[in-house]
Amino acid sequence: MNIFKRLASSKHGSKEATKCSKGTFLPFIRSFGSVEVHSLEQEVVIALGSNVGNRLHNFNEALQLMKMSGIQVMRHGCLYETEPAYVTDQPLFLNSAVRGITKLGPHELLSVLKKIEKEMGRTDGIRYGPRPIDLDILFYGKFGIQSDTLIIPHERIWERSFVIAPLIDLLGLSVDNDTVASWHSFSRESGGIFGAWQKLGGESLIGKEGFRRVLPIGDQLWDWSQKTHVMGVLNLTPDSFSDGGKFQSVEAAVSQVRSMISEGVDIIDIGAQSTRPFAPRISAEEELHRLMPVLEAIVELPEVEGKFLSVDTFYSKVASEAVSKGVHLVNDVSSGRLDSNMLNVTASLKVPYIAMHMRGDPSTMQNSENLHYENLCKQVASELYMRVKDAESAGIPAWRIIIDPGIGFSKNNEDNLDILMGLPTIREELSIKSLAASHAPLLLGPSRKKFLGEICNRPDASERDPATIAAVTAGILGGANIIRVHNVRDNLDAARLCDALLKRKKAHQ
C-alpha cells in the first residue's frame, strides 16, 4: 500500500503541507559570523549515515553521545540501506534520521555533532566518501540559517532520497505543530516535504536494489517486504488454549522446534506464560523456570542456525534473561504496560520489540469496558501509536519496532473480523500521526483462536487450522508481514500463494 496516494484527497497531509509551503512566515538568518538563536528549547531534525565498520553500532553510539550532549531524541525514522551517492565506489550506507529537542543554539549543535563524528573516528577525507558516522542538521526550529559554517535546511536535502525517506518517517500526514509547518514550507514543492518525496519517486523507491527499508535482527538487516514471514508458536505452558501441556518437557519442545524448522518456519516464538482470556498470572521466576531449560536446548540445535528466536513475555526480567541466552526478539502482548521496566530494559538490549494492542491484562481484557469501541480500527491505531511513542521515548528506535493489532485481545468476534479486513485502515490511521509507525512490519496472530471456532462451529482448537489459513490469507492480502501460527506447513503454503498474488498485482500496476 502506498499511503501517499491518499494525499491528494486527504484532509490531512497534502492540503496542510501545501498551505504551510505557501503561507508560513519563516525567520531566516543570514550571517558570515556566529549565529545563535536564543530560546529555551528548539525542535531539531538530524540525519544519520554510516558505511564504515559496524554501521548499526555506530548509530547506537552516536545516539548515546547525542543524548549525553544535550539532545533529547523523541522520534526515530525507519532504517534504510542505500547505495552511495556522488562517490559510488564505496560500501552501502545505513541511513536514518531522528527528531528531538535541544537547548543548544544552531552553531553549538553543529559543534557538538562534529565533535561526536571526530570521537567516532571520522577524519577529513574524500567529500561524500566513506565515513563511520555522518551527522547533518536538517532542520533547527522554524529557522532558516545561512552562515559561513552552517546552512539550514541542509543545502542538498531535496535531491537526496536517502535523506527524505527517513525524514518523512518523523512526520505524520497531519501537520502537528507550527514548527513542522515551517519545515514543510522550506520545500518548494506543492505538498511540502511529501511533495518533494513524491518527486524523487516516493514509496516506489523502497525495495528496489540499492534502497531497502530494513529492521536489524541479530547480525542481519531484515527486509520484510520480500515475503511474508512465518512465526511458529511454541507454548511451554500447561494451560494455553490450543496446545497447553503438550510441550512442557524439553524433549517434546525440541521435537516441535525441529518439526517447525523442517516445515519452513522463519521465527520461533517461545512462551512460558499463558495470555488466554482470564489466565492466572505466574511470576517472572516461574516463567523463567519453564523457559530456560527449553531455550538452552533450542539454541544448541544445529538446525536453528539462520532462524530467529522470539520470547513471548511481558516481564523485563524474562526478556533480559532470554536475550542473554540467544533470543533475537521480544514479543510483549502488553506493550510495556504490565512491567514498568520493560521498555527501558528492551531499549538496553537493542533487539526488535513487538508492541501489541491490548486493553487491560489477560484477566480483564474481555470485560465490557475494554470491549467498547466507537471506531475500532481508528482507536486501535491511536492506542498502538501511543505504545510506539512510549517505546521510542524509552529509547527503542522505530527501526526496531514491530506492531501487532492484537487479534483476540480486547476484541469480540466482530472486532476480530474488522481487524482482519481493516489492516490498511489501521496503517492509514497510524500514518496521520507517524509515518514510521505506519511503515513498521505488522504481525498478525489469529491462529486457532476462539472467534474462528465460534464462526466455523469448531469447539476443538486443533480443528481450526483451515479457518486460520483463511484468516491469515485475508491478513496478508491486507498488508500483514508476519503471521503467528501453530501449523507452520499449511500456513506457509497460504503465505506463499498470497505473496505470489501480491507480486502479480504489483506487476500490473
Image (cartoon, rainbow, N blue to C red):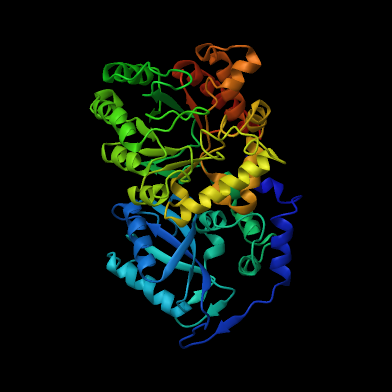
Asked if residue 432 lies left or right of residue 334, the reply is right
Q: Is residue 87 visible?
A: no
Q: Nearer the viewer, residue 202 or 83?
A: 202
The x, y position of residue 256, in whole percent, is 35, 17
Asked if residue 173 lies left or right of residue 290, the reply is right
Asked if residue 97 lies left or right of residue 320, the reply is right
The x, y position of residue 322, in whole percent, is 31, 37
Q: Is residue 483 above or below residue 467?
A: below
Q: Residue at x 38, y 41 (%)?
A: 315
Q: Nearer the viewer, residue 391 or 119?
A: 391
Q: Is residue 441 visible?
A: yes
Residue 414: image quadrant is top right
Residue 113: image quadrant is bottom left
The x, y position of residue 366, in whole percent, is 59, 32
The x, y position of residue 310, in whole percent, is 38, 34
Q: Nearer the viewer, residue 43 or 202?
A: 43
Name the quarter where the C terminus is drawn: top right
Q: Is residue 396 above or below residue 189?
A: above
Name the quarter where the N terminus is drawn: top right
Asked if residue 257 lies left or right of residue 48, the reply is left
Q: Is residue 305 above or below residue 458?
A: below
Q: Residue at x 63, y 17 (%)?
A: 454
